[in-house]
Every structure is written in C-alpha cells, then in structure tokens.
C-alpha cells in the first residue's frame, strides 16, 4: 500500500493534478525540497505547486521504489521545462516519504543532484 501511495504522489505531480494533493497528505504535512525552507500545511503546499514552482511538463522516470513500515523511498530522473529565461531541469532525484495512517504526513524530503 505504501509503495502504491508513493507512485500515486509522483503521478499527481507529473500530471499537475494539484486538486488531488488534498487526498494524499495529512493536514500537518511538512514538505521539503532543495533550496527553500520546509513547506508546512496544505495551503502552503498548494501555493508552492500552483504559484511558486516555475516548472511545467515535469516527468519522473522512476528507477525504483522501496517501502518499509510507514516509509517509502523512490529514485530516478526528473525532467521538466523551466520558466522562460531559465534552463530546463534534468536531474537525478531521491524522495523519502513518511506515510502515517496511509497518508503522506509528517515528512516528505526530496534530494536532487544539481549541476555544479
């Protein structure tokens, strides 16, 4: 079940189905992405994806997913179009999530390799 939840999260992000985020997370969520302060709560997460995240046509190519208890980790490659005037994204990623009670909750942390 946790592995399926991880894959559903990635699908929602790739399809830019922001309305579905409410069905995947607990209200007290903490969502961490490189280069910014942790995002806390659904309102802030919706704002991040709908307004602040300057990417489109994002696609995760999943190489693997492991789950143990209430934790899951996925890894692979992420590609996306960046906002006008910025370079497109093509990075390796790993994402660690905690799913208390079957929802993504207290922690979601993504790591990316960034070009030097």
Image (cartoon, rainbow, N blue to C red):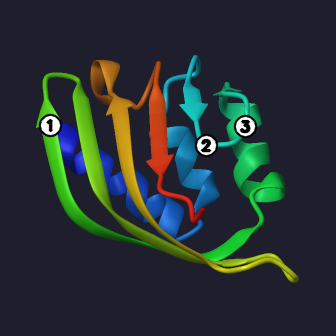
Q: Give the Cα distance between marks 2 and 1.
A: 22 Å
How much space separates mark 2 and mark 3, taking CA atoms? 6 Å
The image's mark for residue 36 is 3
Q: Residue at x 69, y 42 (%)?
A: 35
SS at circle 2:
loop
Q: Horizontally, is 56 left or right of 97 in the view?
A: right
Q: Is residue 12 visible?
A: yes
Q: Which quadrant of the figure has residue 43?
A: top right
Q: Residue furthest right?
A: 85
- Residue found at x 46% / y 33%: 108
Q: Are marks 2 and 3 in contact (CB under 8 Å)?
A: yes
Q: Position of residue 12 (x, y in %)?
A: 47, 60
Which residue is the extreme one toward the front?
116
Proximity of marks 1 and 3: CB atoms separated by less than 8 Å: no
Q: Residues within 10 Å of mark 2 (few under 14, many from 20)?
A: few
Residue occupied by mark 1: 67
The answer to whether residue 58 of the structure is visible from this angle is: no
Q: Is residue 39 left or right of residue 1?
A: right
Of the image marks 2 and 1, the number of the one nearer the N terminus: 2
4 lies above or below 56: above
Question: How far, Cα to Cα, is label 1 from label 3?
Answer: 26 Å
x then y, percent, for residue 102? 29, 28
Q: Which residue is mark 2?
A: 34
Mark 1 nearby-residue class (10 Å; few <14, some 14–19, many ≥20): some
- Counting every numbered tag in the picture gives 3
Task: Work out whether residue 14 or residue 38 is closer to the camera in this orientation and state it.
Answer: 38
Quadrant for residue 76, please give it.
bottom left
């Amino acid at each position: 079940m946790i592995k399926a939840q991880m894959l559903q999260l990635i699908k929602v992000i790739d399809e830019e189905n922001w309305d579905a985020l409410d069905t995947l997370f607990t209200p007290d969520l903490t969502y961490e992405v490189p280069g910014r302060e942790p995002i806390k709560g659904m309102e802030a997460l919706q704002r991040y994806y709908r307004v602040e995240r300057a990417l489109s046509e994002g696609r995760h190519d999943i190489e693997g997913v492991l789950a143990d208890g209430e934790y899951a980790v996925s890894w692979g490659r992420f590609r996306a179009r960046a906002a006008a005037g910025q370079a497109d994204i093509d990075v390796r990623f790993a994402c660690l999530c905690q799913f208390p009670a079957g929802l993504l909750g207290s922690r979601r942390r993504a790591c990316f390799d960034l070009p030097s």
